[in-house]
Image (cartoon, rainbow, N blue to C red):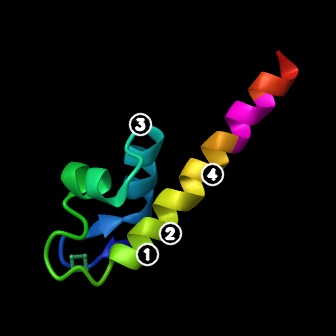
Amino acid sequence: MVICQCNRVTKREIESVVHAGARTPDQVTYETGAGSVCGSCLPALQAVCQRVTAEACDVCVGQVLVS
Ligand code: FES
């Protein structure tokens, strides 16, 4: 699924850079170029960023509780 039409950046590419450590839309834009032209994809970019970050936090919380 393409999130950023201007730069042809997919949801999977955005998820990948967030998993790799990007935590803000600005960092995702720096890594992928998504959001750097018209900006209409920024709300969707931010939603993916927040979802993946929240999932990562759930994993971290689980690891703390287990160990
Ligand atoms: S759709 Fe992403 S910058 Fe235009």
Instruction: Give the spatial CA distance, label 3 vs label 4.
Output: 14 Å
Q: Mark 2 points at which residue?
A: 47
Asked if marks 1 and 3 touch (Cβ < 8 Å), the reply is: no
Residue 48 in view in this figure: yes
Instruction: Give the spatial CA distance, label 1 vs label 3.
Output: 19 Å
Q: What element carries label 3?
A: loop
Front residue of 8 and 20: 20
* 40 sits to left or right of 60: left
The mark lying in front, picked from 3 and 4, is: 4
Which amino acid, by three-letter code, is at mark 4? Ala
Q: Name the residue under label 1.
A: 44
Q: Would you identify the image quadrant in which residue 6 lies?
A: bottom left
Asked if marks 1 and 2 touch (Cβ < 8 Å), the reply is: yes
Q: Mark 4 points at which residue?
A: 54
Q: Residue furthest left?
A: 37
Which amino acid, by three-letter code, is at mark 3? Ala
Q: Name the residue under label 3.
A: 20
Q: In this view, does 40 lie above or below 48?
A: below
Residue 1 in view in this figure: no
Q: What element carries label 4?
A: helix
Residue 9's spot in the image, x, y percent?
29, 65
Viewport quadrant of the N terminus:
bottom left
Viewport quadrant of the C terminus:
top right
Q: What stretch is highlighted in magenta?
A: 58-62
Q: Does the magenta stretch include residue 60?
A: yes
Residue 19's spot in the image, x, y percent?
47, 41
Of the residues under marks 3 and 2, which one precedes in the sequence?
Answer: 3
Q: Is mark 2 on a helix, strand or loop?
A: helix
Which amino acid, by three-letter code, is at mark 1? Ala
Of the residues under marks 1 and 3, which one precedes in the sequence?
Answer: 3
